[in-house]
Image (cartoon, rainbow, N blue to C red):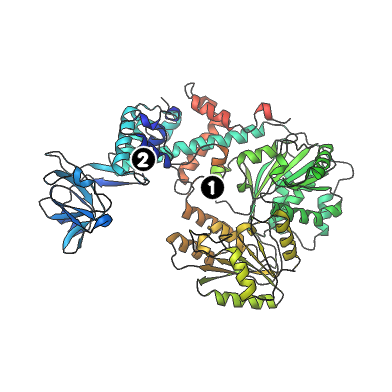
Amino acid sequence: MYLRELTQSVSTLKGAGPSICARLARLGIYTVADLLLRAPRDYEDRSRAVSFREALKTGSPANTVGVVAAHDWFGYGRSRTLKILVDDGSATASLVCFNRAFLADRHPPGSRVRVTGTLALRFNELQSASFEIEAAAEGQGPEAGILPIYPLTDGLAQGTVRRLAARALSEYGRRAEDELPVRVRELRGLPHKARALEELHAPSSPEAAEQAHRALAYEELFYLQILVRRRAAARAERPVDRPSAAPGRAGLRERLVERLPFRLTPDQERVAAEIAADMERPRPMARLLQGDVGSGKTLVAFLAVLKAVESGGQAALMAPTELLARQHAQTAARLLEPLGVRLAFLTGNLKDASRRPLLAALAAGEVDLVLGTHALFSEDVEYRRLALAVVDEQHRFGVLQRLALARKGGVPDLLMMSATPIPRTLALTVYGDLEVSTIRAMPPGRKPVITHLARQGNESKVYEFVRKELAQGRQAYFVYPLITESEASELKNAQDMARNLAEKVYPGIPGGLIHSRLPDEEKRSVMEAFTRGELRYLVATSVVEVGVDVAAATCMVIEHAERFGLAALHQLRGRVGRSDAQSYCFLVYSGNLTEDGKRRLKAMMETTDGFLLAEEDLRIRGPGEIAGIAQSGSLRLAFADPVRDADLLEAAREDAARIVERDPGLLEPEHRVIREVLERANPFPAESSGA
């Protein structure tokens, strides 16, 4: 029995009634397999008895057996609270049962109980409000071994989940078959799947629990690497017909570089050469171009576009928002149209009267470069010869969306861009099938943005500093986490603050407001006015995180900065500092900072390097549902952490490469699970190849 195939409802387990199943569903547990593959968040060692007296003396949790001496109650009405007094022979402890009055019936005076919990001297008695209590049989000691501690939800107790996990383990888990190839499991010294599950939920020692967790983490990474390697192998098998040149289109790249008022950085030259070499090989390019905000990725992408046009092909550049797509279209019009490149702009908002002739021109090959949003891969969009698909801010698209564009018009090269640098461990995990090009150097003349922290209540000093910048002809952004006032939150919002800034802080200075709920035409009008300098400051939400390039903007004010993720803060800061003028970022924070909030703000103060910030962001947030995996319908990492388990990741990559590329004999006949994974991993099935 393969555990992945076990779809028995968790309700088949004794004790899992409708109410319990509903609570388990909140945790994403629907089947027995979901329960067995739910990793405990921690373990508690109850293998040694610790009396009440010893617990008070040493500060360690109590783990003891005693007798209920009495019940006591305090408070009135709904606040009436039960206290259970337990005597274990060393001392009497008062267990304060907040919202647990039902324990009075379960543990009457004179009954024998096992108690674990933290104790403290309060109100002249030994008290605990954080404890577990259960009935104990005569002669039963407190030793219960090492107990798992599971993530919970309201109304779900640890004891309930432990009992259900034990039943699932007994009825199904101990019969689980290995899903890894035998030689791989033996090579890596991994336990059988059934043994790993047993040590995960009922460990014999802390070391055994850790080994079980690592074995299951390796299995996750192995399957993920099989997917990644198979994608790369499938892509390499698709031959590409590379025309030498199109009449009258030679030398477009050289002409663009000559027209630039600056020199390309060495990084830009190197990356452009890598991409050009890829586009001459007999297999389709699949490359990730990453670089910090303002590093010049778009120019490199345009050089790749010209390479495609020179060969007689078409190119498509897809952006996640119309704002960013329009920004790219304006830049393309300035740089590429003078070279004779025919451009088009396509979004879902384009009216049919304009859309039909545009689609006809695309299909006839009368458009060289089309820029737009997800509308570029709509069913009715056809290309005469799509040679290059460029996806900007690729992490904002699902894997299937990216592939849908890549399948248009034959076998196009694929260039994905990201201004959110991807940590190496994450890149190996998700993008291991791609070649990666990195631009680290910034264009010459750019000054690092100076970042300041300001506690909420000191905003007036920030506003005054910005006023001086505005007086010198500069521009500013003010960013807020909410669009409108919320009854559930006291956070500042963009609409109210736009009025406040206009009426009380900067009266007479023209400002604008932009957020996602505005009509597209109004958003476009506001952004164009800000770009032309007619609006001196812009109040916004994180909608300006990408796609806004205004050289005169030198101040970025982010209020309630602790509410933004580290990647978003870095992207927002990247909206300024786009000229040779000194720029500033002000992070206004509230007093009730979490530890993670403190780490994010500290990181922003210490560096402007997006690669260092990306690594720190991964450490703070953890991998979670790694970008693109959930969207592709593939595996979710429940056990593995690419940072912590870097050694397992490298081992899984090596084993997956050997299976997919060099040693298919490792796939024993009974391992149909792996074969099914391989089939699902192929992003170019024959029936939809587009060839």
Mark closest to the chain's N terminus, 1 or 2: 2
Residue where numbered disc 2 is placed: 211
| Residue 238 at least partly seen | yes
Q: Is residue 512 left or right of residue 198?
A: right
Q: Residues within 10 Å of mark 1 (few under 14, many from 20)?
A: many
Quarter of the rendering containing residue 549: bottom right
Label 2: element kind: helix
Q: Is residue 89 left or right of residue 223?
A: left
Residue drawn at the location 81% of the way across and 57% of the way down: 334
Residue drawn at the location 50% of the way across and 57% of the way down: 616
Q: Position of residue 648 (x, y in %)?
A: 46, 42
In the picture, which quadrant includes the N terminus?
Answer: top left
Residue drawn at the location 89% of the way across and 45% of the way down: 248
Q: Position of residue 122 (x, y in %)?
A: 20, 63
Residue type of the residue flagged with mark 1: Leu
Residue type of the residue flagged with mark 2: Gln
Q: CA distance from mark 1 to mark 2?
A: 23 Å
Quarter of the rendering containing residue 314: top right
Residue where numbered disc 1 is placed: 426
Label 1: element kind: helix
State the count of labels: 2
Q: Relative to the observer, which residue lies in front, 19 or 566?
A: 19
